[in-house]
Image (cartoon, coloured by chain):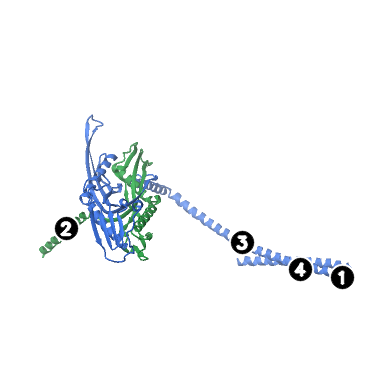
Chain colours: A green, B blue
Amino acid sequence: MKKLTTLLLFVSLFLCSCSNKKEQVEKAMDKAVACAELGTVEYTVTKLIMTNDNEFYKLGDRKIIFSCRTTMKAGIDLAEFKKEDAVISDRGKTVTINLPQPKILLFNMAAEDIKMEYSKVTGLRTSFNTEERNDLLKQGEKAILDDAANLGIYDDAKENATEFFKALLAHSGFENINVCFKEAQK
Amino acid sequence: MDIKDNKNNQVTDENVNIENNAAANENVNIENDAAANDNVPAVGDKAEKEDSVADKVVKVVKTAKSVAKGVGKTAKTAGEVGGKVLDIVGTVAGGAAKSAGLFTSISSFVFANLQTILISMAVTAVAAVAGFIIKDMIEGPKIEDTANVVEEVKKISELTTACFYEESVIQKEKTTTKKHWIKNEIDTVKHSIVLTALCKVRAGYDLSKLGDNDLIVKGDTISIKLPAPQIFDVISNPSDYKVFESAGDWSHEEIVAMQVERKERVLQNALDHNILEKANNIGKGRVLTLFQSMGFNVINITVTEVPARVKPAVPAVEPVAPVEEPVTEPAPVEEAPAVEEQMPIDTLSQVL
């Protein structure tokens, strides 16, 4: 009985490991995934990322300034666009499409576009290491993304998407085209 | 309060009586004056004068009454206010007495335990400073608030249909020489770094390349000639990197060089995984669905060029071989739009 239990345990463990391997292989093969994103506007944003690390309890100063150039693309995620979001009426002359709200589809802060402009270390301080520099750049990345709405990228994305679909549908034979946007989810 | 109110009422009544008496005296005087004027010979004039004097007397009496009432009301309000003030003064005095007692007890407690209190305050202050320093050390330096400057705004029409993700490990080692600060010898120093990185490659159609004759509509049939799929971006942001291990000095430029090299490798891997072909296949399906939802029954999708599997320059990938690949996808009849003729395409490419 004891032997049988041990055997069953080993068999079940073996089966579990097989399924895990299968999952891993599937995951590896699924590296390229399908998406349907219509980018309608591209913003190039520059920023100075700087810090002055001179707290009262530290002996000496550390200062660093990076300049970076980032690219943001915004548009419509067509995966959220369903068949019922396009309504054709008036014997095929009028079409109303209800698009999802625009969103940031891409944020690219390429390493080659980040330059260290200035760095100074005084007193008993050590210079910024790789991890600290990367943390500062992450903060800069977040600051730009957080400010995206204030830059007006969503409004431009909406406007361009409307223009794009109006042009496409007009050349597809529709006379009256209404492009609407779904309400933003809270 | 009731007692005070009664008192006030009494005062009011007295005032009224006094006023009434005064008014009565006035009446008496006036009547006496009128009696004195009886010596005047014209009787009709006399009667008229008596009437007007009587009216005046009535008016004076009325005025006196209303004045008396007003005085009474004022006195009543003054009495109420006075009562309230007295109440408040009493409460404050009681509170002050209580506070004084409490203060005395607190001060006696403080003097008795002065040493303990000072020690606990000092410990609290040290703990607060230590907490601040530890928090600062854990969180690391913070960036200053600087402006985000929009350098360029570009209108695009990129339909991304496939994304390739790769998580990889970047491992580098190097050796440098350094003069020993005591011995006059040159030491060899080893530096090593291990980074983990997540890269993303996006591919699809640039619809701004659609030409004037690339979209033709005839009845319920639409023919579209899509441009060749291309790589739009290879993305790897600072938040996609993690320093797993770092020993020695690594400059910003060295890290950037590693990241650029990794991006090129990921791009090549994406091409090896046929990302352009996948973008093409997925993209045709997406465009088909889009036009089906618009009510077209027959949709012909043609791709201008088949993507070539060559190593491109980062990030834009332009296909080379120009081969046409027509695809006809008949869709089930659902709701056909009333489009009878082929639609002219004049400004589509300009608009897109």
Chain of the residue under label 2: A
Measured Cα–Cα span from mark 4 to mark 1? 22 Å
- Is A10 left, or right, of B82 in this rendering? left
Could you tell which of marks 4 and 1 lies nearer the N-terminus? 1
- Mark 1 vs mark 3, foreground winner is 1
Q: Is residue A98 above or below residue B314?
A: below
Chain of the residue under label 4: B
Percent across and percent down for residue B162 are 26, 54
In the rendered image, the residue lying farthest to the front is B341
Screen quadrant of the C terminus of chain A: bottom left
Measured Cα–Cα span from mark 2 to mark 3? 89 Å
User: Mark 3 = which residue?
Assistant: B81
Residue type at mark 4: give it.
Val
User: Mark 4 = which residue?
Assistant: B58
Chain of the residue under label 1: B
- Mark 2 vs mark 4, foreground winner is 2
Residue type at mark 2: give it.
Ser
Q: Are marks 2 and 4 in contact (CB under 8 Å)?
A: no
Measured Cα–Cα span from mark 1 to mark 3? 57 Å
- Mark 4 vs mark 1, foreground winner is 1
User: Mark 1 = which residue?
Assistant: B43
Measured Cα–Cα span from mark 2 to mark 4? 117 Å
Could you tell which of marks 1 and 3 lies nearer the N-terminus? 1
Identify the element where label 1 is drawn. Answer: helix
Q: Is residue B270 above or below residue A18?
A: above
User: Mark 2 = which residue?
Assistant: A17
